[in-house]
Image (spheres, rainbow, N blue to C red):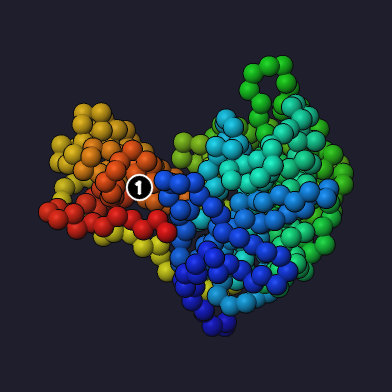
Amino acid sequence: MNRLTFAGTFRRLTSAIALAAISLSPTGHAANTLPPTVDPTVNEQVLMLPVVQNGSTFQFETTIYKPPGTGPFPLLVMNHGKERGNPVNQKRDRFLSMSREFVKRGYAVVVPMRKGFSQSSGTYSDYGCNMKDNGQQQADDVTAVLDALVKQPWVDRSRIVVAGQSYGGLATMAFGTRQYPGVRGLLNFAGGLRIDGGNCDWKSSLVTAFASYGAATSLPSLWFYGENDTFFDHPLAQRLQQAYQAAGGPSQLIAYGPFKNDAHGMVGSRDGVSIWLPEVERFLRGIGMPTEVTVAIADTPRPPATTFATVDNVSAIPYLTDKGRNGYREYLQKSAPRAFALSSSGAWSWAEEGDDPAARAVASCQKNSKVPCKLYSIDHDVVWAEPGNLNPPLAIN
């Protein structure tokens, strides 16, 4: 049995990763904004990764998680989706729950924000209803990221898995046509792209795109689509896989049941781990990738529950106006993971699901408050303490 090693030593962003091959710099942040949230239990770092495409250099905002040691580590590259609106305004994706499971198994995990997303340089563009070329254009960014990463001494260039969610899943499947050296398999979590309005038959265009990808790859792939996915339901997922397989693309579809309010975000939820992890472990073993837990990771710190009030006692919450109390009532209808934060100025905010809702709630509250915001509730517990504000502000950096 392998001996467990322990992760959790936090390294300053400026110390970065082994800089032997390329120069990686910490992300900047505008004046009067908070530095990026990081989880020290998985050595999370946020860096600007220089990538080269067609002779031009871009800086991609990139989140990196690593086990202790110098490697080389097997590598997972996880590709994000696209939110509605301008990609520049999209927040950094972390896929924290997924990344923790891979770091436990000795992997380095890299989550790059592609061109024009969040703080990454360059301009986002697409090909409208042409899903095949949309996926391939995003795959260009994935290829450029790997070209930069494989130069790093901590990356095992012979053991790479590429994954993606939503638009990142489409990019991942398009990337599979590149037959990139060292990449052993693809993970597709609700991959696709939806176009609302106009006369685009985006579903048929997606089927055409997946058929073209399947005709040009030999890489095994594992797909996850949930029954209540509001973007890509089971009938569409089955059409995509049938087209992909008929063209020669190896794949297995895991068509699982409903997940909370929308299965589209399953992989970003801590509660989704029980759905995808057993199937992914089986897939990884089949392609010769490690699955044994070799790194013990401490739980992400959180304030302890207090006896200040019961979680559903809205009248007990200090500082809130009627609008804030109505906001808290809305929060109580959300499923865990969730968190509610407030300040003595009356500012408040809540967050649910996804990466670190506690930190997100505090950060959102702080945008509207000149005094510190503190957590009032996490999941089903009140963590607020009075008098003396015994509950300190959540560490953001």
Q: Amino acid at mark 1?
A: Val
Q: Position of residue 65 (x, y in %)?
A: 56, 63
**Picture coordinates of residue 330, whole percent (x, y):** 31, 33
In the image: residue 355, left or right of residue 385: right
Choose between 9 and 328: the one closer to the eye: 9
State the residue at coordinates (21%, 28%): 322
User: Residue 173 appears at what percent x and percent y?
Assistant: 75, 46
| Residue that appears at 82% across and 43% down | 213
Query: Left or right: 322 with respect to 102?
Result: left
In the figure, 281 relative to 132: above or below?
A: below
Residue 316 point in image, percent of width and height: 15, 41
Q: Nearer the viewer, residue 246 or 123?
A: 123
Quarter of the figure that contains the C terminus: bottom left
Label 1 sits on residue = 362
Q: Is residue 221 left or right of residue 383?
A: right
Q: Residue at x 33, y 38 (%)?
A: 368
- In the image, 183 versus 155, the foreground residue is 155
How many discs mark residues in the rendered view?
1
Q: Quadrant of the N terminus?
A: bottom right
- Image quarter for residue 211? top right
Q: Is residue 308 above or below residue 367?
A: below
**Res. 386 in view:** yes
Circle 1: is it few (<14), some (14-19), or many (20+) Cα within 10 Å?
Answer: many
Q: Is residue 237 visible?
A: no
Task: Name the element at disc 1.
Answer: helix
Q: Residue at position x 79%, y 64% from top?
A: 182
Determine the residue located farthest toward the top in the rendered image. Answer: 199
Q: Nearer the viewer, residue 252 or 11?
A: 11
Q: Residue furthest front?
A: 31
